[in-house]
Amino acid sequence: MYNAFFGFTQNPFNMSPDPAFLYRSVQHEEALANLIYGVQSRKGFILLTGEVGTGKTTMLECLRDFLSAQQIAFASLFNSRLSVDQFFEMLSYDLDLRCNRHSKTEVLLSLNGMLLERASAGRTTVLIVDEAHNLEWDVLEEIRLLGNMENRRGKLLQIILAGQQELDRKMEAPEFRQLKQRIALRCTLRGFDFAETAAYINSRMARAGAGTREQTIIPVPIIKEIQRRSQGIPRLINAICDNLLLTAFAMETKTASLEMLDEVTGDMRLDYSQEPAFPVDDGFAGRSFRRTRVP
């Protein structure tokens, strides 16, 4: 809606996890490098955790792109509210196993044969489970047992469990101690600091068509407030910036203000201190407005 007004060729703050818009912060580069290293080195279990909206799914999208480019077979389960039978059925569909997919025994036999065949040819296979913090104990136990498949050169199936911080806490429970011991690599994503938030916002705008020049649509003081109010969480930053640009468009101004930000974050019901991080003189003091919803 506002793309042409600001000179964008596409929406810079789309909520979808698009790898093309990945801001390669140090922590995201490290997490992706660990995921790729764990797969290539056949480490077995890899854990990726982080607060809601910190970019876990985007990391998995980047990993899937890498696996596809390297012709590495993988199964990707995005719905973790599964029974044991449903888990094996989805696993067999994703890996295209030639067996009775409603029989756990046949799925396991077919999977073992496929993994051995691929391993003998020097190829590996990956299982990616997103939202793993929602997995029931019995499904997690089946996944742990899949990790026992190995030969002399390493694990036959590389298993990546991605989820919110509850997954880390779940691993501390006594019943999960065997799975915890098998986790070879751990990656954790956190919220951005101010410098990362500024670089993130600027890079997305540049990729959307703003060019390499320094953008002035969202001034530095406003970016600092965005970082504070969003706690540096990329998904919240996207939502705030998208609404902020829509508000500026409705007000027919190409510079966002603190008053606009106050309304946007108020509408979003964000929990933050009302005291600004520091005084902001944005030239809109004393003006009253409400966003005009453009049909």
Image: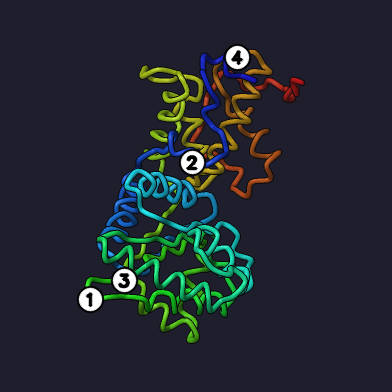
In primary-sequence order, the first of circles 2 and 4 is: 2
In terms of secondary structure, where does tag 3 sit? strand
Dot 2 or dot 1: first in sequence order is 1
Give the position of the N terminus as an image quadrant. Answer: top right
Q: Which residue is mark 1?
A: 152
Nearest the camera: 210 or 9? 9
Query: Which residue carries the number 4 mark?
Result: 253
Mark 2–mark 1 distance (CA, rounded to whole Å): 48 Å
Q: CA distance from mark 3 to mark 2?
A: 41 Å
Indicate the amino acid at tag 2: Gln
Residue at 39% in and 49% down: 63
Q: Residues within 10 Å of mark 1 (few under 14, many from 20)?
A: few
> At 43% across and 25% down in the image, what residue appears?
207
- Discs 3/2, front: 3
Residue under label 3, please give it.
Answer: 155
Residue farthest to the bottom? 174
The residue beneath circle 2 is: 227
